[in-house]
Image (cartoon, helix red, strand yellow):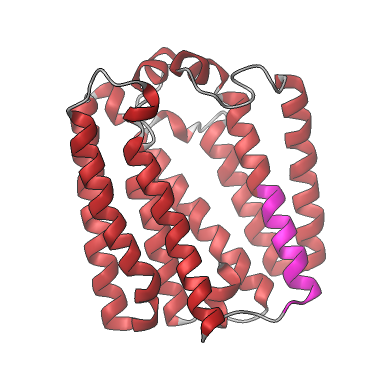
């Protein structure tokens, strides 16, 4: 998506392919690292992630994580200094999210800040891989999506995992102040991103509305799921994560719609 943010669908070049491969390795590295460091919480929450359920041994996952980080750096270096810098930033933020000394996942505020950075560096790496610069459309859309991840995703992901997060020593809003407070913040974040994002796109980058309007629709969906799930306290973990699924579907849909619009235009 970052390459599209530069100037529409880019020409496929060696730098673009290398940048995409580097980013994929960096993202896989960050996710695996998170799984390695989340084993205790995931098992307490009944997660079905491969490491938590024992299908992927922790030592193997840790080794693959290191290999992916190395591959991301090598590929990013081959793609150029711009891509390399953003990939390094992404990897550092991924480490800060999951591992000591920062462990941003332990705090909702730190988590939101780091998640915004992870989203922003992802799009920025794509722009660098395209060899072009930012456009107004790309800048607005990318900021909205990074805010969507930071102010909505980072909160709703915790709503079904309070017990395991508390067992793991986390100090999220849901653990410290209760699930009701976390739900209220998630609703506020969804409304803010949906409304402010749509207004920003309408004022400065009308083309970005192709992706931003679905985010506004998704914000309504997230709010509805938060309210619905609040009435089902006895539901299992899968049911309690309905708001997170709404968040994820919205994120994928917004990106795919923007890609489709550029491909059609």
Chain part drawn in magenta: 12-26
**Quarter of the image that includes the N terminus:** bottom right
Q: Position of residue 223 (x, y in %)?
A: 22, 46
Q: Quadrant of residue 212?
A: bottom left
Question: How far across and down, in percent of the image, does residue 109 sit?
Answer: 34, 39
Q: Is residue 3 left or right of residue 15?
A: left
Position above or below: 58 against 96:
above
* Numbered disc total: 0
From the viewer's perspective, is residue 24 above or below residue 4?
Answer: above
| Residue drawn where x is 64% and y is 71% of the image | 128
Residue 3 pos. (x, y %): 60, 72
The quarter of the displayed image where residue 52 is located: top right
Is residue 208 among what the camera can see? yes
Q: In the displayed structure, does residue 189 sit left or right of residue 107?
A: left
The quadrant where residue 206 appears: bottom left
Question: Depth check: 219 or 39 in front?
Answer: 219
Q: Is residue 60 magenta?
A: no
Q: Residue at x 77, y 77 (%)?
A: 13
Determine the main secondary structure of the stretch shown in magenta: helix
Q: Position of residue 169 (x, y in %)?
A: 42, 17
Residue 155 visible in the shown view:
no
Residue sitting at x 66%, y 43%: 28
Q: Residue at x 57, y 59 (%)?
A: 122
Judge whether residue 24 is colored magenta. Answer: yes
């Amino acid at each position: 998506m970052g390459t599209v943010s530069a100037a529409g669908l880019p020409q496929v070049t060696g730098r673009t392919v290398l940048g995409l491969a580097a980013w994929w390795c960096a993202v896989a590295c960050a996710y695996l690292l998170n799984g390695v460091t989340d084993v205790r919480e995931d098992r307490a929450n009944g997660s079905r992630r491969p490491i938590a359920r024992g299908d992927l041994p922790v030592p193997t996952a840790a080794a693959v994580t290191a290999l992916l980080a190395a591959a991301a750096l090598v590929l990013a270096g081959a793609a150029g200094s711009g891509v390399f810098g953003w990939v390094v930033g992404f990897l550092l933020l991924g480490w800060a999210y999951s591992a000591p000394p920062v462990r941003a996942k332990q705090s909702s505020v730190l988590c939101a800040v780091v998640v915004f950075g992870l989203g922003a560096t992802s799009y920025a790496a794509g722009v660098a891989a395209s060899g072009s610069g930012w456009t107004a459309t790309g800048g607005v859309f990318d900021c909205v999506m990074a805010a969507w991840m930071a102010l909505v995703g980072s909160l709703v992901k915790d709503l079904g995992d309070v017990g395991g997060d508390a067992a793991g020593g986390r100090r999220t809003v849901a653990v410290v102040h209760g699930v009701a407070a976390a739900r209220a913040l998630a609703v506020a974040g969804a409304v803010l991103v949906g409304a402010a994002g749509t207004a920003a796109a309408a004022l400065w980058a009308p083309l970005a509305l192709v992706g931003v309007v679905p985010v506004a629709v998704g914000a309504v969906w997230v709010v509805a799921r938060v309210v619905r799930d609040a009435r089902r306290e006895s539901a299992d973990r899968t049911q309690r994560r309905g708001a997170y699924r709404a968040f994820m579907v919205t994120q994928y849909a917004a990106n795919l719609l923007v890609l489709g619009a550029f491909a059609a235009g």
